[in-house]
Amino acid sequence: MIRYLFWSIFTLILLFNYSIETKILEDIQHVSAIGYDYVDEDRMKGTAAAPFYPAGIDVQPLNAFFTAVGHTVLDILQKQQMESQRRLATGRLQNFLISKDLAKHGVAELTDPLGRSTDIGRDVYMAVVDGSVEELLTFKYPNAPTSAQYLSDFMERNLKDIVPQPTVHAFLDQYEGFAQDPFLPIIGKKDDHIQYKGLALFKDDLYVGELSNKDSYVFKLFYEKTKTGTYEISFKNKKYIATENIRSKVKYKVSGSQDNPRVSVHVSVIGEVKDASSVLMKGNTMKEVEQEWSKETTKRAEKMMRKFQELKIDPLGIGEKVRSHFRNFDKEAWKDRYPTVPVEFDMKVRIVNTGITE
């Protein structure tokens, strides 16, 4: 009898707790993606994508969006909350977007709440939008039940292989740390899909320029080791070769003195040729392809570095490499010295597979 009473009470407690939790979850609408557009010097427009899940079994989520204009992130969120029939929660936020026009005016006021919030994870993906954030978020894409799901798939499965760590955590570390300026992927809506368009460059929290799609591949090579990336080489007689990384490693070396430092960057790539049958049939050896791949990529890296030094930005984090090499490093002197520091790039390529039928 006592045992029966115990299990009856235990079962009731479980059912009671379950019903309370269900009720709480039903009162919440989770924001999956949020983004901001520039309005004027004092205001911005925020758009939140918070898919709605109807009651039932195996039901598809429905698109739901909340848009408001305000002066701060909190002001906009409060206005969006007034439009929602449920409480909006950001604990499951997956993507954070900023329009290029807004990024030109600084993003610190947007990213600061992300860093302070205990509800929002620091692995949230982050990007700059070329065009309207509202239009990109509210468009009904044909290959996903909701626009928020389509964006998450694009950022998580595609974009992370193209650019280094496009997360809030990485951006804040770069922004708050020493001697490295932040960068973010640029995306935009084209017809009925989203596409990657390049890499946004920041000086502190201000957007100051960008790298093309092709140059962002070079940037990733000289920034971190990678196992992904495709690159098209312009070969002899206006022919083109499609190549792909199998794996690559990058190594920085600092020499000289603290007053006159020199930096050399060496990348070793093991890759394959994916599409070049017409070129290979003309008798060009793999050695020539390796040399051309290395030559073209190195030339782009040198041009990219000149751009960084002209803009006085350091997305590669060269200042941190120099600081770790010398004792009593002078941070203020480095800021003046950086634009003229010699930086040499070297790349060694080894092709192990043509990837095509010769």
Image (cartoon, rainbow, N blue to C red):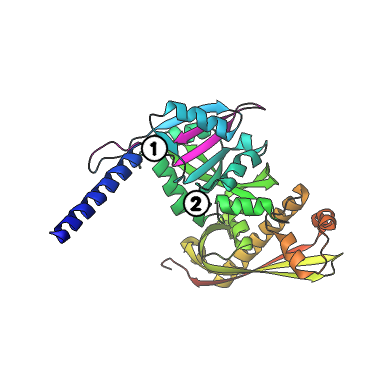
**Amino acid type shown at disc 1:** Gln
Q: Please give the name of the residue rendered at 31% of the width and 43% of the height, measured from the top-left corner.
A: 20
* Observer-nearest of 168 and 343: 168
* Observer-nearest of 7 and 96: 7
Q: Is residue 264 above or below residue 15?
A: below
Residue 228 disc label: none
Q: Is residue 109 magenta?
A: no
| Residue at the disc numbered 2 | 159
Q: Answer yes or no: is residue 319 visible.
A: yes
Q: Is residue 38 magenta?
A: yes
Q: Are the residues flagged by discs 1 and 2 in contact, CB closer than 8 Å? A: no
Residue lying furthest left in this view? 1
Residue 101 on image: x %, y %? 62, 34
* Element assignment for label 1: strand
Residue 130 on image: x %, y %? 56, 38
Q: Nearer the viewer, mark 1 or mark 2?
A: 1
Which of the two discs, 1 and 2, labels the residue nearer the N terminus?
A: 1
Q: Is residue 319 left or right of residue 133?
A: right
Q: Answer yes or no: is residue 145 visible.
A: no
Q: Please give the name of the residue rendered at 47% of the width and 49% of the height, measured from the top-left corner.
A: 155
Q: What stretch of residues is rendered in magenta? A: 30-56
Q: Residues within 10 Å of mark 2 (few under 14, many from 20)?
A: many
Within the image, what quadrant is residue 329 found in? bottom right
Label 1 to label 2, Cα distance in Å? 27 Å
| Residue at the disc numbered 1 | 29
Q: Is residue 254 above or below residue 58?
A: below
Q: How many discs mark residues in the rendered view?
A: 2
